[in-house]
Structure formats: structure tokens, C-alpha cells
Amino acid sequence: MAFLESAKLTVCSLNNPSRLSYDTDTRYEYMRNAGSGNPSTNSKRRRLKDEARTFELKEDLISRLSRAEGQLRGLQRMIAENVYCVDILQQITAVRRALDKVALIVLRDHLKTCVRQAMVRQEAHDKVEELIQTLDRFLAS
């Protein structure tokens, strides 16, 4: 399992390494769809960061996402238990704020690492355009 040696794998891959393979030459990770034994016919390709996130940052992000996940489960219970509408809306607001904070932390990390590296490599224009498109989609939702 050579791919486990890389610090660039996501935490979800560590939880289920049988679903992943790692191509060190192209800096891409291939995540096979569940239920398919053939990775060549059913793979998704996603880019990996050049510089791995710190352990502390990963822990913080995962912790925040776990809390948001718990809040979402709480929302499901609230709806199932016929809780008052305003209380449900307040919980939805809390989940949104939690996810917005995660997005802000990821954006800050992106600027400090990916965009900064692109500037050093004289590739800032492409990275800034990608960021603008991403922010357009993010803020439009």
C-alpha cells in the first residue's frame, strides 16, 4: 500500500483505503465508486494539493465538519419529531455558519499555499482565474 506513505491523502482515504489508489506521477487520486471492482471503468479523478495540509489544520477541519454533521442529524430528528419551524430554521442557520467557517478556513489555506506557490512559479494568473470562478459558484449558491 504505497499510497498510504503519502501525506497527501485525505482523511476519508485513510478510513477506507480499499477505495483509493494514488498516482504519484500526476498528483491525482483515483476514487473508485462503491460496488465496482474495476477501477478503470468507474473512477473519478481529483486533484491533490502540492503542499499537504498540516495535521492541525486537518484536525480542525474534520472536527468542524463532524460538528456540522451532528447538527444535520439533529435537524433530521427535529423534523421527525415535529419541532417548531422557527427552531428548525435556527438550526439550519447554525449549520450554514459552521460550513461557511470551514469554507473560509479552506479558502485561507488555498491562498496561503496553492495561490502563493503559483505566484512563485509565475502561474498566478491561472490560479487567480480559477479562484474567481470558484468564488462565483460558492457565493451564488
Image (spheres, rainbow, N blue to C red):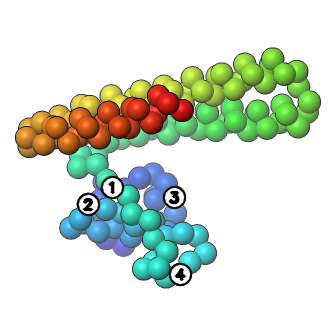
* Residue highlighted by disc 3: 15
Task: Tell me the SS state at disc 2.
Answer: loop
Marks 4/3 in contact by CB < 8 Å: the verdict is no
Mark 4 surroundings within 10 Å by alpha-carbon count, few (fewer than 14), some (14 through 19), many (20 or more): few
Disc 2/disc 4 C-alpha distance (Å): 23 Å
Query: Looking at the image, is mark 3 or mark 2 earlier in the sequence?
Result: 3
Please tell me whether residue 66 is drawn above or below residue 41 in the rendered image. Answer: above
Disc 1/disc 4 C-alpha distance (Å): 22 Å
Left or right placement of residue 32 versus residue 116 in this view: right
Task: Tell me the SS state at disc 3.
Answer: helix
Query: Looking at the image, is mark 1 or mark 4 earlier in the sequence?
Result: 4
Query: Looking at the image, is mark 2 or mark 4 earlier in the sequence?
Result: 2
* Residue highlighted by disc 2: 27
Residue placed at 56% from the left, 26% from the top?
98
Query: Looking at the image, is mark 4 or mark 3 earlier in the sequence?
Result: 3
Disc 1/disc 3 C-alpha distance (Å): 19 Å
Q: Amino acid at mark 4?
A: Gly
Please tell me whether residue 120 is drawn above or below residue 82 in the rendered image. Answer: below
Disc 3/disc 2 C-alpha distance (Å): 20 Å
The quadrant of the image that shows the N terminus is bottom left
Marks 1/2 in contact by CB < 8 Å: the verdict is yes
Most distant residue in the right direction = 82
x then y, percent, for residue 128: 23, 35
Task: Tell me the SS state at disc 4.
Answer: loop
Label 1 vs label 4, nearer the camera:
1
Marks 2/4 in contact by CB < 8 Å: the verdict is no
Query: Looking at the image, is mark 1 or mark 3 earlier in the sequence?
Result: 3
